[in-house]
Amino acid sequence: MEIGMPELSIILVIVLLIFGPGRILKVSRELGAGIRQFKQGLEGPSESNQPEKNSDLSVNQGEEKDDSAG
């Protein structure tokens, strides 16, 4: 028993109705990110995998408290 194009299209329509387009896009983005991370893991460590030093500064700026607000 083989699955042809008519069967695949019916399955895709049912999945779309159940999950909705937003959920399907989210899952596909997460799947793509996972595949990219897997490929990067196979290649080994590189400079692009290293966190940037400037990113620490931007995180700390948002956490500063305003002492004059009292």
Image (cartoon, rainbow, N blue to C red):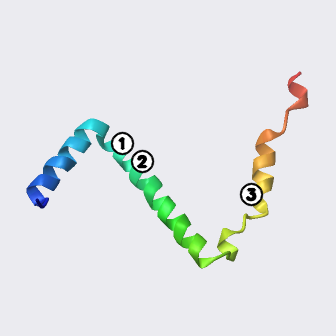
Q: Which mark is residue 26?
A: 2
Q: Position of residue 47 (x, y in %)?
A: 69, 75
Query: Which numbered disc covers residue 61?
Result: none
In this rendered view, identify the residue nearer to me: 4 or 53: 4
Disc 3 marks a residue whose amino acid type is Ser
**SS at circle 1:** helix
Circle 3 is placed at which residue position?
Answer: 55
Q: Earlier in the sequence, mark 3 or mark 1?
A: 1
Q: Position of residue 24 (x, y in %)?
A: 35, 47
CA distance separating discs 3 and 1: 30 Å
Residue 23 percent coordinates (x, y) = 37, 42
Secondary structure category for the residue under label 2: helix
Q: Are marks 2 and 1 in contact (CB under 8 Å)?
A: yes
Figure label count: 3
Residue furthest out toward the front: 1
Return the residue nearer the eye: 8 or 2: 2
Q: Please tell me whether residue 16 is drawn above or below residue 4 in the rendered image.
A: above
Who's the residue at 67% across and 76% down the image? 46
Tell me the amino acid under the disc marked 1. Gly
Q: Quadrant of the N terminus?
A: bottom left
Decide if residue 68 is on the left or right side of residue 9.
right
Q: Which residue in the structure is indicated by mark 1?
A: 22
- Disc 2 to disc 1, how far (Cα)? 6 Å
Residue type, numbered disc 2:
Lys
Q: Residue at 44%, 57% (x, y): give it.
A: 31
In the picture, measured across the screen, residue 2 lies left or right of residue 26, that is left
Q: Residues within 10 Å of mark 1 (few under 14, many from 20)?
A: few
* Mark 3 or mark 2, earlier in chain: 2
The C terminus - image quarter: top right
Where residue 68 appears, as percent x and y from the top left, is: 90, 27
